[in-house]
Image: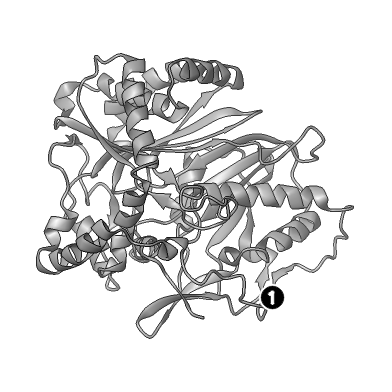
Amino acid sequence: MVRHLGGIEQYFYQRSSLNLHSCFSVGVELNSLPNRSDFICALRRVVNSHFQLYCNAYKSNNEVVVNPIGEPIKFDDVVDYMDWDTYGEEEINSVFRKYNFEYGVDKPLWKVIVVPKANKMIFATDHLFFDGIATVLFWTELLKSLEELKQDNDLDVDEIIYRPGGSTDSIDQCHPYEKLPIPFSWKVKRPIVKALFTIAPGAVVSQDASIIQFDEYKIPEDYLKKNSNDDGCYQIKNTNRQISLKMSSNKLKVIMKDCKQHHVSFTAYLTAVLYLALGKIPKEKYSGSTIKYEVPMNTRNRISNSGEYSNSYGTFVAGGEFIETLDFERDEWELAQSIHKKIVEKSTTGVMDAINEARLLELVDAKKFMKMKFETTTGPSSTFEVTNLGFQNFSQNEHSKYTVTDAFFNEPQLFTNLITYSVISTPNGGLNCSMAYPEKLDSILCNSVAFLKNKFN
């Protein structure tokens, strides 16, 4: 059976096809790195277990289908060793500029970048087959495979990690969202949206004029390095500031205890702090009366009670969009409680609506939608996005040979969000939050950054 892209996959596919998104990355720092032979053996086991690691998206009869790659995958095809002393802002942005994975070719949509001098490994991937949690699952399985190796492997181990021609039974017949029944209310909405996009597409992609914007940052001029080429593709600058906000494990435990006492999730508390940080910006530097923030939701355990998708790779996300009026005098915990209530409502009773919103992309020309969404934008449609991958121990124990000493999560420059906060926490490294924003806003956001560093420390 041919595997077509679902609506949400079409969104990611067209966004990357137009070069409006290159990749995102989740990395780990280890106490020591595996040798090449062990790495090959462990990687081979993981790659052959998940079609997302050996498939690409190909055009076929005016449709896009998922098929296995037709060429062998060698270790050097998917692993790059870098002679960097560290993995900081310059290196992070260089990854986003270099790795723009191509569709329709016999190459996978991911790379592992190894930085031996820093004991770090970074998994960079296209968004088509992976969301943030899927990358955590990748690292968890790879580290488990390394632990299960009986002994060090010979140096002359076969470096091919995938050979084409195997069974395609493991390829899902469709995106899991496509299996969900469409509620009656959405059956009514779907033809209306389809007709509206045909008659008045601008109404579908319009953005809220009340959301704060900065005169110093405009799209496309401050976002693109080069406007669309003859093939209709763009070229993003990817020169964001990449600020690392660290919170120790001990402080994280204290904050988590405070969150429990105030009956809020850590994500809600963090979002409240990030909102209040914007109050440090001089009022004359922006226009608008509201802040829009996004908290993407992991839907794996929302679309099935059996837990069948708990450990599945793929894009199990739904949008969580919220708007707050500007009021930077609000109490931190009162604001966190308000945000918590909204997030809980959206992630429980509202999650199916969010999924069906994403499924509307099944009805329209996704490429036309993406181009129109971008070309009608003068500024980001959202003030900031918080993506929290949670507290992850990568299924390790005290006897693990390869110990995760830290983890980090980074996102490229986006036209939909002014600021992105990419968060992941580990037992040894504490909380790691990457704050990414356009370099043009560095002087404007300096007080906000100082406020957050003080909060995190």
Please count the marks in the image: 1
* 258 over 274 or under it: above or below: above
Q: Residue at x 75, y 55 (%)?
A: 39
Asked if residue 443 can be seen in this view, the reply is: yes
Q: Quadrant of residue 451?
A: top left
Q: Nearer the viewer, residue 419 or 356?
A: 356
Residue 135's spot in the image, x, y percent? Answer: 56, 50
Q: State left or right for residue 28 relative to residue 341.
A: right
Q: State left or right for residue 313 relative to residue 240.
A: right
Pointer 1 residue: 163
Residue 66's spot in the image, x, y percent? Answer: 49, 73
* 155 over 325 or under it: above or below: below
* Colour option used: one colour
Q: Quadrant of residue 280?
A: top left
Asked if residue 438 can be seen in this view, the reply is: no
Q: Residue furthest bottom?
A: 61
Q: Nearer the viewer, residue 341 or 89?
A: 341
Q: Residue furthest front?
A: 184
Question: SS class of the residue under badge 1?
Answer: loop
Q: Residue at x 48, y 32 (%)?
A: 433
Looking at the picture, which amino acid does disc 1 mark? Arg
Q: Nearer the viewer, residue 139 or 286?
A: 139
Q: State left or right for residue 76 relative to residue 175.
A: right
Residue 386's spot in the image, x, y percent? Answer: 39, 37
Q: Nearer the viewer, residue 155 or 324?
A: 324
Residue 79's spot in the image, x, y percent? Answer: 64, 58
- What is the crowding at mark 1: few (fewer than 14 residues within 10 Å), some, or many (at least 20)? some
Q: Residue at x 13, y 31 (%)?
A: 287
